Image: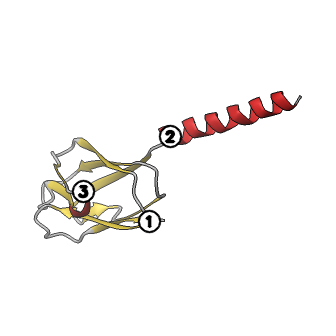
Amino acid sequence: MKRIFILIALLMTTASWAKDNGAKQVVNIEVVETGFTPKEIKVKPNIPVVLQITRKTDSTCSTEIEIPSKKIKKDLPLNKTVSIEVGALKKGEIAFGCGMKMMDAGKIFVN
């Protein structure tokens, strides 16, 4: 009986780890005439973050996104979704914005 209990406990731990290990936080962002929307994003720490960004307007300077603290800079083609793997983040704030730094920056809040 004791062996069965230990085996069940081990299986539950392994299954939980596999589920957590494969999890990603996917955030959809649009670039519109007023900038990035949403401008503020909340995510959990230590779980990989993927940004799915679609530029919906051609009347701003946001033809690219920059995440300086992660050394990420990507072009944002009009009406095409760009996937950016930001990775697992630690608690704190991460700023993002357009490559020309002319629009209000957005923030990823990790807590």
Q: Nearer the viewer, residue 99 or 80?
A: 99
Q: Which percent across, then down, holds residue 72?
A: 21, 54
Q: Identify which residue is drawn at 78% across, 33% down.
A: 6
Q: Earlier in the sequence, mark 1 or mark 3?
A: 3
The reply, left or right, for residue 53 in relation to residue 1 is: left
Q: Is residue 8 left or right of residue 98?
A: right
> Label 2, label 3: how many angstroms apart (C-alpha)?
31 Å
Is residue 50 depicted above or below 105 in this figure? above
Residue 101: horizontal and vertical position, in percent?
14, 68
Looking at the picture, which amino acid does disc 1 mark? Answer: Lys
Residue 1 on image: x %, y %: 89, 28
Name which residue type carries label 3: Val
Question: Mark 2 or 3 closer to N-term?
Answer: 2
Q: Is 14 above or below relative to 41?
A: above
In the rendered structure, find residue 21 and report the number of the disc placed on it.
2
Where is residue 63, by image quadrant?
Answer: bottom left
Q: Quadrant of residue 9?
A: top right
Q: Which residue is mark 1?
A: 91
For the point 15% across and 54% down, the residue is 64
| Mark number displayed over residue 31 | 3
Q: How many marks?
A: 3
Helix, strand or loop at label 3? It is strand
Determine contact: label 2, label 3, CB under 8 Å. no
- Tell me the CA gap for discs 1 and 2: 18 Å
Real-space Cα distance between discs 1 and 3? 26 Å
Residue 36 is situated, as x and y percent measured from the top left of the image, at 27, 61
